[in-house]
Amino acid sequence: MSKPLSNAQYRKFIKGMPADKQIESISRMLRVIPHWLMEEVARPKPNEKVIKHLESRLRQARLMLSEYYVNGKVA
């Protein structure tokens, strides 16, 4: 399995998008990550690294959403 994007790389990727695509991508992540977290926790042997990464990505997505609402784009 390949290594997931870091939060800094993810943020850079989102910043490179037009403003309408930014909000679409951030909203999608905010919908999907909680489901991924629940699926990972429900596994017989949940991977703590995966859970930690998903929680970190969820915090990053929430931060970017608040920036989007304040600035009209991810700054």
Image: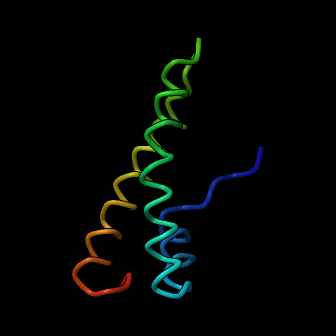
How many numbered discs?
0
- Picture quarter with the N terminus: top right
In the depicted view, which residue is nearer to us: 75 or 73?
73
Q: Is residue 28 left or right of residue 1?
A: left
Q: Is residue 70 left or right of residue 32?
A: left
- Report x, y in % for residue 52: 44, 40
Applied colour scheme: rainbow
Residue at left 59%, top 11%?
Answer: 44
- Report x, y in % for residue 4: 63, 54
Residue at the limit of the structure toward the left, as seen here: 70
In the depicted view, which residue is nearer to us: 66 or 57?
66
Q: Is residue 11 left or right of residue 1?
A: left
**Relative to 9, residue 50 above or below:** above
Residue at left 38%, top 81%?
Answer: 74
In the depicted view, which residue is nearer to us: 49 or 10?
10
**Relative to 38, residue 36 above or below:** below
Residue at left 32%, top 60%?
Answer: 62
Residue at left 69%, top 52%?
Answer: 3
